[in-house]
């Protein structure tokens, strides 16, 4: 009972023990409960939104462009000729319309006449008389739609006034005699089915061949692709490729292995932080499956450690057994506030892409980077303080990247996972363990134009 | 605003409610943290970490219990974790340091103020201090203390007995009057 009384007395007295905490505690608590909910989503949503906006807008623009030219690409030149040839044999009697088709196609090579194309259709008036007016109109419309591809370089694609005699006369009058060599031949043949049947291709062939040549030359020219690249993911620090760093950045911790070090505490555990990059690239096609590329990008890496409160005071920090430095502010090591070590780089990536399947390619590259800014903290295990010192970082980094990309929209958009590992030591000091930046992200390449 | 409504508003993320909850309990909880640590700075670090845990785990609080007791349990656990973390680099958190302090069943009258008694408890070696606080002040059994600290129940009992004996001897001598704690002398 007596023993219980003693404990009861102690217990009662201790219930009255109160102290007023400093204002700093609530600020830290507020930061601690706010950080997890606010910071991460903002960064991740920002990256995701950027990728979606870029991808979506490009897809929309390219889709619009595809729609515009799809009408003209429904028939390949060769197929068009074959179709026309067979049609001619089956529709011998419809020489008037065939003549119209041939005339329109031939008119491509007679530029000045083509601007007066509506008037030239008057020349087929005699042939049209053999058809009903409705049939003529519908067939005429169909034929002129086909022809429009071949005359796409001209402002007038469809005849608007078939019976405009005045236009015909004016066009004929304005045209020079040597411009009608092919047209005259066709016009003369319109009224005569046999002539049209005998001489259909000599006139058309050169035109279609020219078009085919034009197309093939366009294909050959698409050797260069230009676009934007972006990635978003996570990064941390490693002491080796697969070994996570025990402490962030430079950690001088001579008492780590000895017990009874007094004030020594180990450096905070390093946790992953967000990472992203955005930039532009140019790719050169080398053969059917290979592309070589280069670009410029901004890269952001980060990781998170736990620190205590910030103190604005000039103190001496230890960087080795022999080296000391002075800093004007530091963070205590006792505390639970997350601190984001941020590393900003300007990078020049060089990469090679191997298309190993229709929609998949494997991209490997080297990235040369220059650090432009960092707020990362080093650790002094002797005094138990975290401090900033840019001079302890190696400004230039060389990294390797590898990614497997899935192609969308004729491989104009590529997206897939990527990992990056920096060969070079993040620190420029040989004291302590080397640190290497590592990241895993989702990468997207968006091709904007070709040349 | 009662605790139930306060917790509800805190869970909605209302910063005013969170601040009010903190204001209500911070002073008492700092006293709890103070008893387990060696300095006010360390006590505030534990308090800060403890309150972050409180707000992040508030959804786990069941309204049938007392909110203050729930927060205090979190603070005590945070303090224990803090001490364990410290023990990796410090030698003074030991539950079997080899020094045999006298055991006594004396039950002296405590003519000390609250803060003086707290100061005396804080003068105990960290291992003694922790076990004494857990058993005498928080009311944990030795079995619970053994589980919490990862030590044998018997170790907890013996360490408590020695902590109590040391404290009783200090209370009798009232070492605070000499400004130098007996424990400090004994270590020298």
Image (cartoon, grey):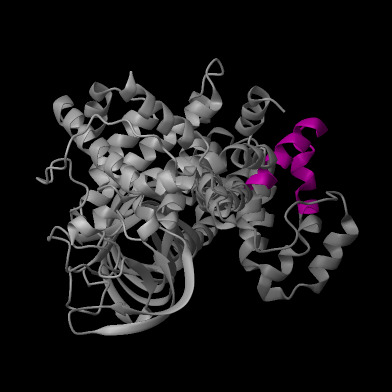
- Across and down, in percent, residue A428 comes to 25, 79
- Across and down, in percent, residue A307 comes to 40, 58
Question: Which residue shows up at 43% across the image and 52% down it?
Answer: B45
B74 over A68 or under it: above or below: above
Q: Nearer the viewer, residue A157 or A347?
A: A347
- Pick out the residue farthest to the top: B64
Q: Nearer the viewer, residue A337 or B99?
A: B99
Left or right: where does residue A40 sit relative to residue A415?
right
Dominant secondary-structure state across the stretch colored magenta: helix
B180 over A442 or under it: above or below: below
- Can residue A231 be seen in the rendering of this structure? no
Left or right: where does residue A84 sit relative to residue A162?
left
- Across and down, in percent, residue A431 comes to 17, 76
B79 over A373 or under it: above or below: above
- Across and down, in percent, residue B136 comes to 35, 30
Q: Quadrant of the N terminus of chain A?
A: top left
The quadrant in which residue B2 appears is: top right
Q: Nearer the viewer, residue A4 or B146?
A: A4
Q: Is residue A85 magenta?
A: no
Question: Which residue shows up at 32% across the image and 60% down it?
Answer: B180
- Can residue A160 be seen in the rendering of this structure? yes
Q: Which residues are magenta?
A: A121-146
């Amino acid at each position: 009972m007596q023993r219980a009384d003693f404990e009861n007395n102690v217990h009662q007295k201790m219930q009255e023990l109160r102290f007023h905490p400093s204002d700093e505690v609530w600020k830290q608590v507020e930061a601690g409960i706010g950080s997890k909910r606010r910071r991460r989503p903002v960064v991740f949503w920002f990256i995701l939104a950027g990728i979606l906006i870029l991808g979506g807008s490009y897809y929309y623009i390219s889709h619009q462009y595809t729609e515009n030219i799809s009408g003209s690409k429904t028939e390949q030149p060769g197929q068009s000729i074959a179709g026309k040839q067979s049609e001619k044999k089956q529709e011998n009697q419809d020489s008037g319309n065939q003549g119209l088709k041939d005339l329109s196609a031939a008119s491509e090579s007679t530029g000045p006449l083509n601007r007066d194309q509506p008037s030239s259709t008057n020349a087929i008036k005699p042939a049209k008389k053999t058809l009903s007016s409705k049939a003529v109109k519908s067939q005429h419309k169909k034929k002129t739609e086909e022809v429009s591809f071949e005359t796409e370089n001209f402002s007038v694609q469809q005849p608007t006034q078939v019976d405009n005699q005045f236009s015909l006369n004016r066009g004929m009058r304005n045209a020079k005699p040597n411009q009608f060599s092919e047209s005259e031949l066709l016009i003369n043949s319109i009224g005569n089915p046999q002539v049209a049947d005998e001489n259909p291709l000599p006139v058309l062939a050169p035109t279609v061949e020219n078009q085919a040549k034009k197309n093939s030359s366009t294909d050959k020219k698409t050797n260069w692709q230009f676009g934007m690249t972006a990635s978003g993911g996570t990064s941390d620090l490693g002491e080796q490729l697969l070994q996570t760093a025990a402490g962030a950045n430079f950690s001088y911790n001579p008492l780590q292995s000895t017990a009874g070090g007094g004030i020594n505490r180990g450096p905070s555990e390093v946790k992953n932080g967000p990472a992203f990059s955005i930039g532009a690239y140019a790719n050169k096609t080398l053969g059917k499956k290979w592309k070589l590329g280069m670009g410029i990008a901004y890269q952001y890496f980060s990781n998170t450690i736990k620190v205590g409160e910030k103190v604005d005071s000039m103190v001496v920090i230890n960087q080795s057994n022999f080296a000391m430095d002075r800093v004007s502010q530091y963070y205590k090591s006792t505390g639970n506030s997350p601190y984001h070590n941020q590393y900003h780089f300007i990078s020049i990536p060089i990469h090679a892409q191997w298309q190993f399947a229709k929609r998949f390619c494997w991209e490997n590259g080297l990235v040369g980077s220059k650090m432009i800014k960092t707020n990362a903290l080093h650790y002094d295990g002797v005094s138990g303080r975290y401090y900033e010192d840019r001079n302890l970082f190696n400004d230039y980094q060389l990294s390797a990247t590898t990614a497997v990309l899935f192609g969308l929209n004729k491989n104009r958009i590529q997206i897939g996972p990527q990992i990056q590992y920096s060969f070079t030591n993040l620190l420029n000091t040989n004291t302590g363990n080397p640190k290497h930046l590592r990241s895993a992200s989702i990468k997207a390449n968006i091709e904007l134009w070709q040349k | 605003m009662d605790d139930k409504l306060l917790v509800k508003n805190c869970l909605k993320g209302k910063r005013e409610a969170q601040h009010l909850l903190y204001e209500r309990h911070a002073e008492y909880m700092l006293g709890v943290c103070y008893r387990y640590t060696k300095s006010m700075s360390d006590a505030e670090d534990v308090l800060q970490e403890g309150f972050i845990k409180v707000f992040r785990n508030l959804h786990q609080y069941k309204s049938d219990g007392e909110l203050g007791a729930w927060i205090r349990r979190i603070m005590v656990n945070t303090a224990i974790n803090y001490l364990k973390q410290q023990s990796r680099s410090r030698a003074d958190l030991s539950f079997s340091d080899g020094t045999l302090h006298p055991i006594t069943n004396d039950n002296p009258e405590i003519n000390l103020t609250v803060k003086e008694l707290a100061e005396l408890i804080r003068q105990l070696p960290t291992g003694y201090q922790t076990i004494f606080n857990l058993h005498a002040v928080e009311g944990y059994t030795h079995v619970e203390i053994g589980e919490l600290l990862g030590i044998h129940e018997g170790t907890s009992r013996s360490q408590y007995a020695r902590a109590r004996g040391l404290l009783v001897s200090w209370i009798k001598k009232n070492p605070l009057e000499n400004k130098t704690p007996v424990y400090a002398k004994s270590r020298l």
